[in-house]
Amino acid sequence: MEKQQGNLFYIETYGCQMNVADSELVASILVDNGYRQASDIDAADLIIFNTCTVRQHAEDRVIGRISNEMSRKKQKPHLKIGVIGCVAQRLGEKLLEVNAGIDFVLGVDQYKSLPMTLRFLDSWGVKHCSDFNSEQSYEYHSPLRSGKHNAFVTITRGCDNYCSYCIVPYTRGRERSRLASEIVREARQAGEAGFRDITLLGQNVNSYNNRGATFPDLLEMVNDVESIRRIRFITSHPKDLSARLISVMQKSNKVCEHIHLPMQSGNTEILKRMNRGYTARHYWKLIEKLRDAIPNIAITTDVIVGFPGETEEQFDDTMEMMKRLRFDAAFMFKYSVREGTEAAGFENEVPEEIRLERLKKLINLQTGITTEKYQQQTGLTKEVYVEGVSKKSTAELSGKTRDAKVVVFPGDSSLIGSFVNVEITDAIGWTLKGRQLSKE
Ligand code: SAH
Ligand code: SF4
Ligand code: F3S
């Protein structure tokens, strides 16, 4: 009985898709070692927080959450609580000072030592903090996938770009490209298990390079995997997006008509101080090339406002660029200072209220553009990968188009997991409404 009670784990994941993929990896390591996934957090004997520190707010939020969850130990003394991911990597042992209830802290390259860490805890009650300096590519593992239809496949780990505002190179370490053969194996395995939509993951997928195989090569290899129907990738970096990549995207029928291409700023001087390695003009020309090659491509982006020293005019350049490029959607952020990064030492911090004001202005502008773009989809026929029942109504199904838009339409749940042609009849916010035309 005690044994049964002792091995249920629950992982709570924050941050980017990389963390989602890592949680799937950690889950598989635990299952291989005799642990079982708990149905919910209340049932767990082991709770793991996979954390994000990209902005201070993200870190504060997860630390607050961990502190709250400590009260569970009063009812369940054998409960263990661990912290992994980017906050773990950034703060290391300091986390044990922040919260004495934490049982272990593991950095992003240490997940294979999790079973050993847990044995130490069980046998001797030793709290554990791993070495945070190794490099790991986690080859020859099969992640325990959390989704049903979309599978993430990590292709690179770490980042060498050192954008001046960004903590990721410090938490994720140096860039490593995984073996192409392993990536193809994982993609094939996912496809055979019924995942038709694969997303290749890396902080900058465009710089993938393993023994001469580049990112466009890899896309071609994955495109040949029969069981897969759609291929996506995040994130692309404008400085490394090659003409060959555009041509491979154009030619490979499974590569979806969507690219997430963070712009960060529409002003060249700011881009320079961000250490992004491209000019505003280069970025805009890239968008033109992408749209020329793939006319119906959806383009999404990330933007930071209030970077140190950003003047009103420089912010206006970002606004103008958003008007000119008309992204399908954008993730927009207020600059958040990250200790240890280059920009943390920059002068002329933009006051918080101005950052917020600029953010609101930008969100306002982009919301209008996104709404118009979605409205323009009315009347089109789109191939929808049906992923489940709509959250709002059980009589409706929900799925995704190749260009990454959510579509809701009336239909029978037997269609879940299949591809359906849907005519778009309306757009409500950032959801398209439609009616089914045909199932393939
Ligand atoms: N590797 C990806 C994702 C990095 S994190 C890329 O290069 O795009 C996701 C986004 O968070 C970034 O694109 C950036 O817009 C934002 N971001 C990163 N650091 C930030 C910071 N210090 N303050 C505000 N936003 C930040
Ligand atoms: Fe951060 Fe830049 Fe690397 Fe993206 S490319 S993770 S923004 S350093
Ligand atoms: Fe956050 Fe780490 Fe991803 S800091 S955005 S979880 S790489």
Image (cartoon, helix red, strand yellow):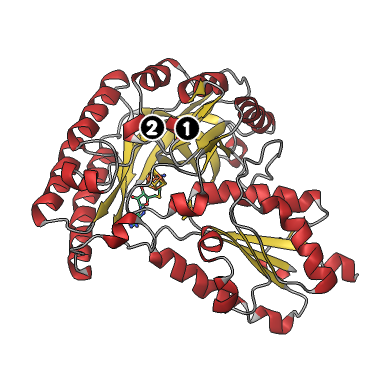
Q: Secondary structure at mark 2?
A: strand
Q: Write down the residue under mark 1.
A: 232
Q: Quadrant of the C terminus?
A: top right
Pointer 2 with pointer 1, Cβ within 8 A: yes
Q: Which mark is residue 8?
A: none
Question: Please, is residue 351 above or below residue 413 in the view?
Answer: below
The percent position of residue 273, horizontal first and vertical second, equals 23, 48
Q: Secondary structure at mark 1?
A: strand
Classed neighbour count for the residue bearing mark 2: other residues with Cα under 10 Å, few (<14), some (14–19), many (≥20): many
Q: Write down the residue under mark 2.
A: 258
For residue 236, which quarter of the picture? top left
Most distant residue in the bottom direction: 74
* Residue occupying the point 88% across, 71% down: 2
The percent position of residue 424, horizontal first and vertical second, equals 36, 34
The percent position of residue 159, horizontal first and vertical second, equals 46, 43
* Residue occupying the point 21% across, 64% down: 349
In the rendered image, is residue 414 in sight?
yes
